[in-house]
Amino acid sequence: MLFALLFRQAGATIDPEDAVRRRAAFEWTRTWALAATTGVLSGLIALTPALRAAPWLPGVTYWLIPAGIGLFALIDRRRARAG
């Protein structure tokens, strides 16, 4: 989460005219927030009784990271086409 907050801060300090760098900072913030959220979710699952029934589940949650990044890319492409 620290990286997400650092990229968020960087995005806030970039010149508003520099849309490319601001967009890059936003995308990195989003990606690192996704990674942090996935890690917390994995930890929470590991603390539940579901761990006995499915000991593989906390590790599988990390597949949400590439799936989320792919979803973000799809959303970004649709936004670019629309506007």
Image (cartoon, rainbow, N blue to C red):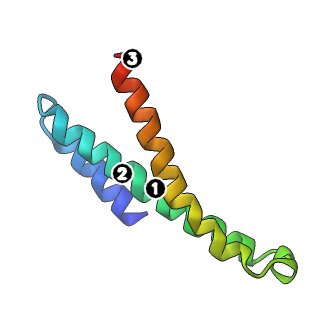
Report the front residue among 35 and 47.
35
| CA distance for labels 3 and 2 | 23 Å
Q: Tell me the SS state at disc 3.
A: helix
Residue drawn where x is 17% and y is 37% of the image: 20
Residue drawn where x is 17% and y is 42% of the image: 21
Query: Identity of the amino acid at label 1?
Result: Ala
Q: Nearer the viewer, mark 1 or mark 3?
A: 3
Q: Position of residue 55 (x, y in %)?
A: 77, 82
The picture quadrant where one finds residue 46 is bottom right
- Say the numbered circle drawn on residue 53: none
Residue drawn where x is 51% and y is 60% of the image: 65
Kindly check if marks 1 and 3 are in contact, taking CB atoms under 8 A apart as contact: no
- Say the numbered circle drawn on residue 29: 2
Residue ID for mark 3: 82
Kindly check if marks 2 and 1 are in contact, taking CB atoms under 8 A apart as contact: yes
Q: Position of residue 10 (x, y in %)?
A: 22, 50
- Relative to 55, 58 lies left or right: left
Numbered marks: total: 3
Report the front residue among 73 and 43.
73
Query: Identity of the amino acid at label 2?
Result: Thr
Residue ID for mark 1: 33
Above-or-below relation of 6 to 42: above
Mark earlier in primary sequence (1, 3)? 1
Above-or-below relation of 30 to 36: above
The N terminus: image quadrant: bottom left
| CA distance for labels 2 and 1 | 6 Å
Q: Position of residue 31 (x, y in %)?
A: 41, 54
